[in-house]
């Protein structure tokens, strides 16, 4: 694959996933979401077809591909109107971290389930008073014989009601310095002492957000993923794929909104002329197309760097991609709603619900402002502002 053309295999993967997404479609997806139902059928079929495990090593039942392949799956499903948010979390963050840093026993226990979609794992880093600042997390893990005890609280954790386990970012005491350092733990969602409560959101989404409480949760020693002393590095190994996947999710959403708008602009006539023939309608849609394509290029660059093992380069590109994709998706959704006029805010046409959903792209999993801080400090070499 060069900088501008995806491989034939990647293009074939996109086409196959797009076919699957169209069989379900945006109307089905939003009907499920409004009814408070899950999109389990789509997840299960995508898993059986191998799409959810394209990045899992072949020896554990996966496709042996990279994050670029998984991002393509995520984007195509979102472009069909049925984006699976848990793809950003379960196969991207959790499977990646376990693949890179897990023990052989952990890999055998979890990766085959990621590969076929039979396992979902949530990811818990965000806290009420810390956001994603891993240095300020208050969730702690302390040694208890051969095991661990976790205490703390997490917020805005996606999909706890669907997950078999949650990968929790806690902090452990460094034996040499006495300082608390981040560490990663696999916590089954049925563990005694673990509770979660849904957060009421103004979003039309089948995936729910939760506050998670960890009150004396006892874990075996092998719940720790990777080295206790290198967990911050391991954490970022999962966060770069998260940003790449979030960008792909946003691009897919933007493509879906733009497609709906273009169809409407071709068909809707005013004074015997399709409204798409007017520059006031056509130009915002053209801008949306251009900006989505630009975001796509940066996302592919980020994925290529990550899959090549360039974590530093991937970190910069993944943040830029996530920024660009979020802004492009918001602009595409806004243009789609405006193109539809009053119809853009009806459930029938399926774009109004994307207003709040696209706005999330600017906030999560890392805010626009923190990306700008990252680029200013790390790319431009400006003084740290916080």
Image: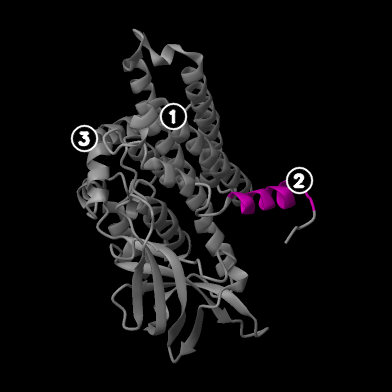
Q: Going 40% across and 73% down the picture, which residue do you hit? A: 212
Characterize the local packing of mark 3: few (<14), some (14-19) or many (20 or more) Cα atoms within 10 angstroms. few
- Which range is magenta? 368-382
Q: Going 34% across and 21% down the picture, which residue do you hit? A: 263
User: Disc 1 to disc 2, how far (Cα)?
Assistant: 37 Å
User: Disc 3 to disc 1, how far (Cα)?
Assistant: 27 Å
Q: Is residue 266 above or below residue 177?
A: above
Residue 380 numbered tag? 2
Residue found at the far top of this picture: 272
Q: Is residue 374 rendered magenta in the image?
A: yes
Q: Is residue 4 above or below residue 371?
A: above
Is residue 184 or residue 272 the one in the foreground?
272
Task: Name the main secondary structure of what is drawn in magenta.
Answer: helix
Which of marks 2 and 1 precedes in the sequence? Answer: 1
Characterize the local packing of mark 1: few (<14), some (14-19) or many (20 or more) Cα atoms within 10 angstroms. some
Tell me the element at label 2.
Answer: loop
Whether label 2 touches label 3, CB < 8 Å: no
Q: Is residue 298 left or right of residue 101?
A: right
Q: Position of residue 262 (x, y in %)?
A: 38, 22
Q: Going 19% across and 49% down the picture, which residue do you hit? A: 41
Q: Position of residue 285 (x, y in %)?
A: 47, 24
Please state which of the two labelled residues, at mark 1 or mark 2, is closer to the viewer. 1
């Amino acid at each position: 694959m060069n900088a501008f053309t995806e491989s034939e295999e990647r293009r074939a993967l996109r086409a196959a996933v797009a076919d699957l997404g169209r069989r379900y479609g945006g109307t089905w997806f939003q009907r499920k979401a409004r009814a408070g139902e899950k999109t389990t059928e789509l997840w299960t079929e995508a898993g059986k077809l191998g799409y959810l495990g394209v990045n899992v090593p072949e020896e554990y039942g996966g496709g042996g591909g990279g994050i670029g392949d998984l991002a393509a799956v995520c984007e195509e499903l979102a472009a069909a109107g049925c984006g699976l948010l848990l793809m950003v979390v379960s196969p991207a963050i959790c499977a990646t971290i376990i693949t890179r840093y897990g023990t052989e026993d952990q890999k055998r226990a979890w990766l085959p389930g990621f590969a076929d979609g039979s396992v979902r794992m949530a990811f818990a880093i965000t806290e009420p008073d810390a956001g994603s600042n891993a240095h300020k997390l208050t969730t702690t893990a302390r040694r208890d014989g051969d095991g661990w005890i976790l205490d703390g609280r997490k917020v805005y954790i996606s999909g706890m009601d669907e997950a078999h386990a949650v990968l929790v970012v806690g902090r452990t005491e460094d034996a040499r310095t006495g300082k608390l350092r981040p560490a990663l733990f696999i916590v089954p969602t049925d563990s005694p002492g673990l509770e979660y409560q849904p957060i009421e959101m103004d979003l039309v989404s089948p995936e729910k957000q939760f506050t998670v409480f960890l009150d004396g949760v006892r874990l075996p020693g092998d719940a720790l993923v990777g080295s206790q002393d290198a967990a911050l590095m391991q954490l970022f190994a999962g966060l770069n794929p998260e940003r790449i996947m979030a960008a792909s999710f946003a691009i897919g959403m933007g493509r879906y909104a733009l497609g709906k708008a273009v169809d409407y602009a071709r068909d809707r006539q005013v004074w015997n002329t399709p409204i798409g023939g007017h520059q006031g309608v056509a130009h915002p849609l053209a801008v949306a197309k251009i900006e989505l394509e630009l975001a796509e290029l940066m996302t592919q660059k980020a994925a290529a760097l990550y899959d090549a093992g360039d974590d530093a380069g991937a970190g910069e590109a993944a943040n830029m991609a996530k920024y660009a994709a979020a802004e492009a998706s918001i602009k595409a959704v806004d243009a789609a709603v405006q193109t539809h006029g009053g119809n853009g805010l009806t459930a029938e046409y399926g774009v109004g619900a994307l207003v709040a959903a696209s706005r999330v792209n600017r906030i999560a999993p890392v805010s626009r402002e923190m990306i700008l801080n990252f680029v200013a400090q790390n790319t431009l070499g400006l003084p740290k502002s916080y």
